[in-house]
Amino acid sequence: MKSVTKVFWYSLAICIVVVIWGAIMPKRLESVTEAVTSFISSRFGWYYLLIVFLMLIFCVYLIFSRFGKIKLGKKNDEPEFSLPTWFAMLFSAGMGMGLVFWTTAEPISHAFTQTPGAKAGSDEAISDAMRFSFFHWGVHAWAVYGIVALVLAYFKFHKDAPGLISATLIPIFGEKRMSGLPGKLIDTLAVFATVVGVAATLGFGSGQITGGLSFLFGTPDTFPVQLIVLSIASNLFIWSAWSGIGRGIKHLSNINMGLAAVLLLMLFIAGPTLYILNMFTDTLGSYISKFFDMSLRLAPLQSDNRAWIDSWTIFYWAWWISWSPFVGIFIARISKGRTIKEFMLGVLFVPAIVCFIFFAVFGVSALNLEQHGIAKISDFSLETSTFGVLAEYPLGTTMSIITMFVVAIFFITSADSATFVLGMLSTNGLLNPKNSVKIIWGLVQSAVAAIIVYFGGTQGLQNMLIIAALPFSVIILLMGASFYKCAMRELKQSKP
């Protein structure tokens, strides 16, 4: 434990305080954080839309600029992982488990429950449902992850700086400030956002697995069963993190992308194949044609539409920002040796296209059932909506069992990626933190997840994650400015 820093103790203390608050007064925690979250959404909605759009523009600019040739490492460094493994690992960490469920639940909600503007159940609402699903899970999300990951990888592997958020801001604020209290507070914010976000997801994911077991096999959907699921998964992801990136996380990510591909192909064949192809093509076209309109859509004169934007688009943008320290650090860690151009093309577009394909297959299969009165998927809970869709198609039971494995492995890879990142942040950016540190963070995440599930404080902690996104968004902008300043100086010095 000699390698841990003050960031470890600061973060641990804050987590304990929040968990105690959530355990003793869960409703109070939820109400307070909900009020702050609502204030942020209504007052800073324009800010979130603008900064995420600017991040995307900056990422695209880097691909075609002189910066694209800079290698994230030394001149002779080669990528540590093959392209397929790299894609699998960054996708598993960045989206993972949530994608399996939101691919059915989100389009159904947009089309039949709470629409972006059209009449529920109409052809326009169904078209909008797919387009906005593409929008929320597309290049905007990966631009947020991409810029954080790029800056971290550049300073860590190209400039030999510690793998810390604070270290990337040294060109702007100086080494003295970033090694002092201001830097420690920045890194503590990153650790806290990661712990709370992943803990909430662990609680959420164990609920999904428990709900799936109940739907498929009739097991009790109760807290003790959920706790057993959480305990088993925790042991597995701690073991995976202990094994290291080159073994546990790498192999699990590859296995899971293979299983996800099999599941996707099975539903594509068993489901409304032609309808899926037609909707994918049409949605991709409307996504591109209305890209700028969606990116800056705030509907200030339409209160109902604005409420939808607050609860969906603004929520998602804040969510991606709050997850960016965890996902960004992990993507940076696995991207050594790639050029900025190669990095940005891979991070920005490949996972987004995979998300589009998932939404086309799962989302259209779900919409088809409700649209034609075969099954009312909108009546299912989030935990069981995907299983409800699969049950209506041939080989439904087989696909549901595969889905359980996919969710479980995504559950593990997301958690062990976070455990690895927390170990880095709390040991001054060590690329290979001690196993004792990773195990401690794994246990902390699991304990927080168990407590918030039992006391019902998940929503309050998710709200806290959204609140943490506001100050961290400023840090991301500063990271981008710091990178630009440092890289521009490098290019000028390299001129003959």
Image (cartoon, rainbow, N blue to C red):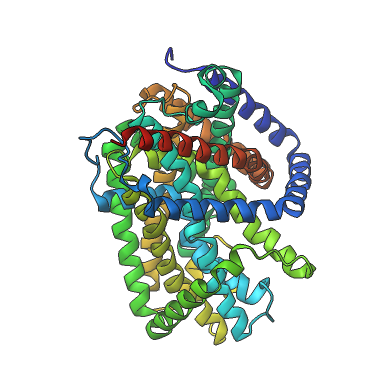
Residue in the image at 46% along x and 64% along y: 216
Name the one closer to the observer, 83 or 368: 83
Q: Position of residue 38 (x, y in %)?
A: 76, 51
Where on the picture, by quarter, is residue 195? top right
Give the residue furthest to the top.
2
Where on the picture, by quarter, is residue 470? top right
Name the one closer to the observer, 396 or 108: 108
Q: Is residue 491 left or right of residue 196?
A: left
Q: Position of residue 147 (x, y in %)?
A: 47, 45
Name the one closer to the observer, 439 or 65: 65
Q: Quadrant of the N terminus?
A: top left
Where on the picture, by quarter, is residue 379? bottom right
Asked if one can make out residue 474 in the rendered structure from this viewpoint, the answer is: yes
Q: Position of residue 428 (x, y in %)?
A: 44, 21
Residue in the image at 48% along x and 61% along y: 138
Asked if one can make out residue 227 in the rendered structure from this viewpoint, the answer is: no
Total numbered circles = 0
Q: Is residue 16 left or right of residue 358?
A: right
Q: Position of residue 81 (x, y in %)?
A: 25, 43
Residue in the image at 42% along x and 47% along y: 93
Q: Quadrant of the C terminus?
A: top left
| Vertical arrangement, residue 486 with respect to residue 328, above or below | above
